[in-house]
Amino acid sequence: MKFGVHAGLQNTTTDELRSLWRRIEAHGFDWISIWDHFYAADATGGAVCLEAVATHAALALETDRVQCGSLVYSVGYRHPAVLANAMATLDHLASGRIVLGLGGGWHQGEYDAYGIPFPPVPVRLRMLDEAIQCIRALLTEDVVDFDGEFFQLRDAKCEPKPVQQRLPLWIGGAGEKLTLRTAARHADGWNVPFLDPDTYRHKVEVLYDHCAATGRDPQSITKSVNLGLAWRQGDLEAQFGNIAEFVKPGVLMGSGQEVVDRIGRYTDAGAEWVILAMRAPFDVDGLDRFAAEVLPALR
C-alpha cells in the first residue's frame, strides 16, 4: 500500500498550500495531487478556488520526491492538446514526477457561470474517452492524426516530450458502463473518492470485467481510492461542511487501530493507493497523527 494526499484548492492560499506540501513530503507520503475547479467543490456557490494548472506547476517546483498528480482535470475545460502540452512541460519542471488524472466533470455550477457547455453524462464520458486517446498519442508519438466525434488532430505534435517515457494517465470516476470501460481500455491508473470498502470492491470487480472484455491485464492499472480523514466528528464537518454526510462512507474515523483496520479492508478490496482527501481548513495535526500512528503500521 502506498499513501498520498489530495489537497483541495478552495478557501486557501498558495503560501498555505506550499507549507502543507512540504509537510506531506517530509512525512514520507508518496503522492500529492490537486483538483480542477474554478468554484468551491461543494454546493455553496463559493468562488474562492485556485486554478489547477498553475497550482500543479507550483506543486512540481515546491516538492522533490512525491508524484505530482491531478484528481482530476475536467475534460470540458481544456482541449486535450492544450492539456497534453501543459503536462509535458510540467513533467520537465518536476523532473519526471507528473501524473495526469482525467474525468468527465460534474460541477455544473461553474460550467454555467462561465458559459462552458455542460452536455449530458454520456456525452461528457465519450469526450473523456477521446481525450485520453489524444493525450496519450500526443505525449508518445511524433505526429498525431485523430478524427473523433469531439476532437480532431491533423499532423499534430507535442514537443518536447515528457521526461517520463510513459507519463501515467489516470481516469477518475465510478461509472460502471463508460468510465470504468475507458479506464480499462486506456488508463494507467484509476481513482474514485469516498466509497465504502464493499462498494469499492464491487467497482474493482467491474473494472476487471472490462479488462477481460478488452484483453487487458488488470494488474497493469494502478487502483486508488480517495478517503477523508476525521479523527473526530467535528473534523469531518469542519472540512466538508454541507457534504459531510455524503462523503462519510469514505472517511477514515475512530482510533489509530480502527483507521489501520479500515485501510486493510480497502487493501483486501484491491486498492493499491490510499490518498487522503483534505480541504481547508487543513487539519495538519490530524495529518501528523496519521503519519505517526498509521503509516508505520502499514509499511
Image: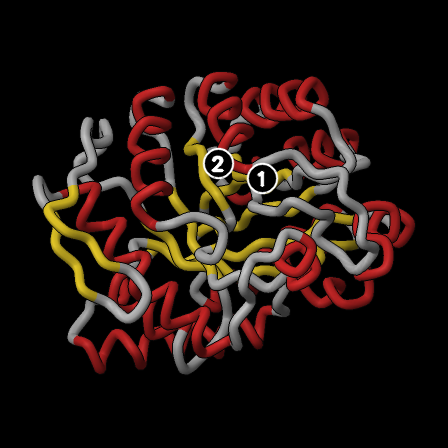
Measured as percent of width and height from the top left, residue 250 is found at 67, 62
Between the residue at mark 1 and the residue at mark 2, the CA separation in whole angstroms equals 6 Å
SS at mark 2 in the image:
strand
Visible residue check, residue 288: yes
Does the residue at mark 1 contact the one at mark 2 (Cβ under 8 Å)? Answer: yes
Residue in the foreground of this view, choosing between 104 and 252: 104
SS at mark 1 in the image:
strand
**Kind of residue at badge 1:** Val
Residue at image location 63% in from the left, 38% down from the top: 7
Measured as percent of width and height from the top left, residue 174 is found at 50, 71
Q: Find residue 210 and report its image quarter.
A: bottom left
Visible residue check, residue 264: no
Residue pointed to by mark 1: 5
**Kind of residue at badge 2:** Trp
Q: Is residue 251 above or below residue 150?
A: above
The reply, left or right, for residue 218 in relation to residue 48 is left
Residue 31 badge: 2
